[in-house]
Amino acid sequence: MRSMKPADRGAVGSSLPGRTSVREARLRPEFADIYSGIDPDTWFSAAGLAELLITRLLREGVSGEELPQRVLDPAHFEFRNGESASRSSA
């Protein structure tokens, strides 16, 4: 499977003035064994990381209807920048 490396972060942190910066997520070290190929303590684009995890779940046979509403479990990941899901889903 494809692993997530810092280079996959894209333009993280390069927001224009007046625009919200890219939402980032990083895996907490204590959950690294659950998410093989994702470096803990490294910030990634939250959207890119979510896409990677959704792809993994689909390849493992999870149907689209069975996908969790939030792929990046807040207990397993830390977030910074951008809008939180609670603010953007209102």
Image (cartoon, grey):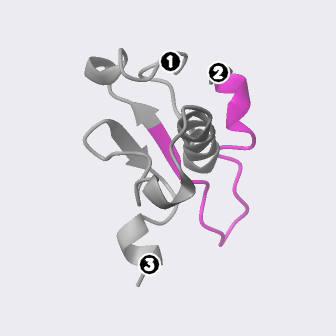
Kind of residue at badge 3: Ser
Work out which quarter of the rendered image holds the N terminus and state it.
top right
Q: Where residue 39 is drawn, which disc sits there?
A: 1
Q: Are marks 2 and 3 in contact (CB under 8 Å)?
A: no
Identify the element where label 1 is drawn: loop
Drawn side of residue 48 relative to residue 61, left or right: right
Disc 1 crowd rating (10 Å Cα; few below 14, some 14-19, many 20+) is some
Q: Was residue 7 drawn as part of the magenta stretch in this picture?
A: yes
Q: How far is disc 1 from disc 3 in space, using C-alphas? A: 28 Å
> Residue shown at 68%/21% (left/top)?
2
Which structural element holds mark 3?
Answer: loop
Amino acid type for the residue under numbered disc 2: Lys
- The x, y position of residue 29, in whole percent, is 32, 19
Q: CA distance from mark 2 to mark 3?
A: 28 Å
In terms of image quadrants, where is residue 20?
A: bottom right
**Where is mark 2, residue-wise?**
5
Mark 2–mark 1 distance (CA, rounded to whole Å): 7 Å
Q: Which residue is mark 3?
A: 89
Q: Magenta part mainly helix, strand or loop?
A: loop
- The residues colored magenta run 6-25
In-image side of 17 versus 40 (left or right)? right
Residue 79 appears left or right of 76: right
